[in-house]
């Protein structure tokens, strides 16, 4: 065994989990699939006094459609999405992202809620769900609140979660029939942390686009109205109009000083644009 | 200790183990099933891959206690398994192993690919095996072996099972616990406080491994800002997470910096020497510190230079923050995350400094800061701590 000693609780339901969290006053960590927390525990980077295991909570394993959007409980795994065990409103976009997260043995336990809570900038869902316009519901004993993914991730490993609060569900809006999707990432080795992520949801018919430049050491760059990246106007020829100089400027503004790093990010974003237009 | 009841290789077992026991250690040490191998122990190498409720999972980052009621199958439980039998023959034929260390995990992952992949596409097999590292074979024989088994089975009209046979949602192995067996556990034993402080006058210069340059402006004249920098207690109060342990002297400070980066927390205790040069409106603080909990040490320095702006009514503060981290925290190896944290801390520092000089109370008073920084879920901070910790304080102590 490698972690420092910790106490372990397996609450019966969500409310008892929230009570345990509230009572611990910040000295507890939630574990679901443990695919991010496990390595950190083993490396003793994290040494909580108490681990609250929510992986058995049936309330968080629900997935279904509600008012045209997809609602995924926090415990839905990457493999659940990859295999199509959950409904899909993104016409395959989420399945494609899920299938390329880490390795199958990790996807069988790693959860979408856990990945978001961990807020690693290199994680796929942080960028992909921001591009898809998803929202996250957080719950504490005081109640629930909801926010856009791009507001939820505030920095490297920093989320908007407050003490006593957990991610309850992810709400994904339906992808319009006319909307194109592109997602690309660069990993030094398949399945490893991404060094650059590009995601784009572009709807030429509606002249709208959301663009995300992710895996940049801090919260991703999320451009909700991305016309500026396409010469001020989004139309069917967006592939030709994609302006790498604007992307480069966005990266510079985000503090990426290294020219080579910016080049990698811009190239990966361009791949995502080409994939969307293909 | 918790009593953990689950099924291993179709046999019911009930054994007590500490909650921190990984499933891999559980099957190896408690059940003598040593076919499951441990390599990296953080989910990367794949040697420990076992079947959990029928699908592959990393037993090194899955805790046995979280598998209450689950079905675990290790390599020993696959002796009679049809697919694994075919794979063993193919591995032998294709020379798909040499030392054999990766082979148990490799067979578990290969079996999953044989079940799920529609055809023997080499690229998909290679991607599917990317989570299992082999340092002997170069993978060529392994890929051939997996290809041959898939081809043979599809030729026999055995259809793929794209979901690997899983039908329920949620983490594999979860949700089968029948009751809450956990008992309250004694909290971790308190760690001894660090007693050895850096001896006076022994804080050396060093060459930082990482240097961050930061610049911010303050709407105050340079002389006032420079005087402020002489008020070490005041400066320390503006630094997020810093507390002084002994009254500061003009040339030396001792204290603690607590840093949090997501779930990572560290508390560096140490000492720093202070130098300043009124002629050039510049100075430096050079410190060393250690975080006892993570057995990490850091050296850090802050060099500052004040530049008059707008005819001397405002000041640009040019900060150069350098640090070197050694020990466990240095192995995290994601320097970009530390830079992001450092950037945020410096921004907070600048804001506090401005408020302090304007006579307003510091944005984050000590109690708020404590709860913000607090404890166990704070690993990340450690990283920051090592960045700035050695810079601003010096040596570490466990929280």
Image (cartoon, coloured by chain):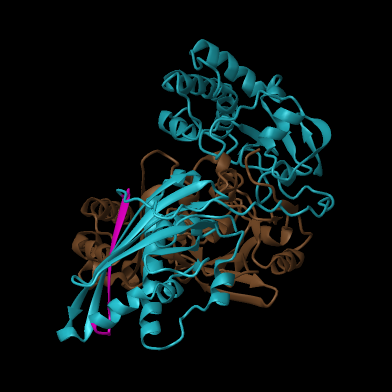
Chain colours: A brown, B cyan
Q: Which quarter of the image is occupied by the N terminus of chain B? A: top right
- Res A25 quadrant in image: bottom right
Residue B355 shown left or right of residue A256 in the figure? right
Judged by its main secondary structure, the magenta piece is: strand
Q: Judge whether B83 appears above or below A210 on screen.
A: above
Identified at 72% across, 25% down, the residue is: B33
Q: Judge whether A181 appears above or below B358 on screen.
A: above
Identified at 73% across, 58% down, the residue is: A58
> Is any atom of residue B37 visible in this view?
yes
Percent coordinates x, y for residue B156 in the rendering: 58, 21
Residue B214 magenta-drawn?
A: yes
Percent coordinates x, y for residue B293 in the rendering: 58, 50
Residue A135 shown left or right of residue B161 in the figure? left
- Res B317 quadrant in image: bottom left
> Is any atom of residue A182 visible in this view?
no
Percent coordinates x, y for residue B49 in the rendering: 60, 33
Q: Which quarter of the image is occupied by the C terminus of chain B? A: bottom right
**Residue extending furthest toward the left:** B311
- Res B88 quadrant in image: top right
Taking depth in this image into account, of A224 and B39 the one nearest to the observer is: B39
Which residues lie in the magenta part?
B208-221
Identified at 70% across, 22% down, the residue is: B76
Q: Judge whether A197 appears above or below A71 on screen.
A: above
Residue B146 magenta-drawn?
A: no
């Amino acid at each position: 065994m490698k972690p420092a000693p910790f106490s372990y609780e397996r609450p019966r339901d969500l409310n008892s989990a929230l009570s345990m969290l509230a009572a611990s006053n910040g000295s507890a960590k939630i574990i679901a699939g443990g695919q991010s927390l496990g390595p950190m525990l083993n490396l003793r980077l994290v040494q909580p006094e108490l681990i609250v295991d929510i992986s058995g909570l049936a309330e968080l394993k629900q997935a279904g459609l509600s008012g045209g959007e997809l609602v995924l409980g926090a415990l839905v795994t990457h493999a659940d999405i990859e295999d199509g065990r959950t409904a899909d409103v993104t016409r395959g976009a989420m399945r494609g992202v899920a299938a390329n997260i880490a390795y199958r043995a990790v996807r069988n336990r790693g959860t979408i809620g856990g990945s978001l809570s961990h807020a690693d900038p290199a994680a796929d869902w942080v960028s992909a769900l921001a591009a898809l316009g998803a929202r996250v519901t957080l719950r504490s004993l005081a109640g629930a609140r909801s926010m856009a993914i791009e507001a939820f991730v505030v920095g490297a490993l920093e989320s908007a979660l407050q003490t006593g609060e957990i991610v309850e569900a992810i709400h994904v809006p339906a992808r319009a029939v006319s909307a194109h999707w592109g997602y690309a990432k660069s990993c030094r080795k398949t399945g490893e942390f991404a060094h650059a992520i590009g995601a784009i949801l572009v709807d030429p018919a509606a002249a709208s686009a959301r663009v995300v430049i992710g895996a940049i050491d801090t919260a991703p760059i999320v451009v909700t109205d991305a016309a500026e990246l396409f010469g001020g106007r989004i139309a069917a020829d967006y592939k030709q109009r994609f302006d790498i100089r604007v992307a480069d400027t966005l990266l510079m503004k985000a503090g990426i000083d290294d020219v080579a790093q910016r080049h990698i990010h811009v190239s990966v974003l361009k791949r995502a644009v080409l994939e969307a237009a293909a | 200790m918790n009593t953990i009841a689950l099924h291993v290789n179709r046999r019911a077992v009930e054994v007590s183990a500490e909650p921190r026991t990984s499933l891999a250690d559980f099957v190896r040490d408690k059940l003598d099933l040593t076919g499951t191998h441990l390599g990296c122990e953080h989910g990367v190498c794949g040697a420990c891959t076992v079947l959990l409720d029928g699908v592959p999972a990393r037993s090194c980052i899955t805790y046995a206690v979280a598998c209450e009621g689950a079905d675990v199958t290790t390599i020993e439980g696959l002796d009679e398994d049809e697919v694994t039998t075919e794979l063993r023959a193919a591995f032998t034929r294709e020379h798909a192993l040499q030392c054999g260390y990766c082979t148990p995990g490799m067979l578990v992952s290969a079996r999953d690919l044989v079940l799920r992949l529609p055809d023997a596409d080499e690229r998909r097999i290679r991607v599917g095996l990317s989570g299992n590292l082999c340092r002997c074979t170069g993978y060529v024989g392994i890929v051939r072996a997996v290809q041959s088994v898939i081809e043979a089975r599809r030729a026999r009209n055995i259809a793929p099972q794209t979901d690997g046979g899983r039908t329920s949602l949620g983490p594999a192995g979860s949700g089968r616990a029948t009751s809450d067996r956990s008992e309250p556990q004694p909290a971790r034993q308190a760690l001894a406080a660090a007693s050895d402080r850096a001896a006076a006058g022994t804080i050396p210069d060093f060459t930082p491994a990482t240097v961050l340059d930061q610049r911010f402006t303050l709407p105050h004249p340079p002389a006032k800002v420079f005087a402020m920098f002489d008020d070490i207690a005041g400066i320390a109060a503006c630094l997020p997470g810093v507390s002084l342990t002994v009254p500061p002297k003009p040339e030396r400070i001792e204290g603690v910096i607590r840093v949090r980066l997501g779930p990572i927390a560290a508390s560096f205790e140490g000492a720093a020497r202070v130098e300043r040069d009124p002629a050039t409106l510049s100075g430096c603080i050079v410190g060393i510190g250690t975080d006892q909990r993570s057995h990490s040490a850091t050296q850090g320095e802050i060099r500052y230079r004040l530049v008059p702006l707008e005819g001397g009514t405002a000041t640009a503060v040019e900060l150069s923050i350098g640090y070197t981290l050694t020990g466990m925290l240095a192995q995290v190896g994601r320097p970009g995350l530390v830079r992001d944290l450092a950037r945020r801390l410096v921004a907070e520092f600048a804001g506090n400094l401005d408020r302090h000089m304007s006579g307003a109370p510091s944005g984050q008073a000590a109690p708020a800061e404590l709860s913000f920084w607090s404890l166990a879920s704070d690993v990340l901070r450690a990283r920051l701590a090592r960045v700035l910790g050695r810079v601003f304080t010096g040596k570490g102590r466990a929280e």
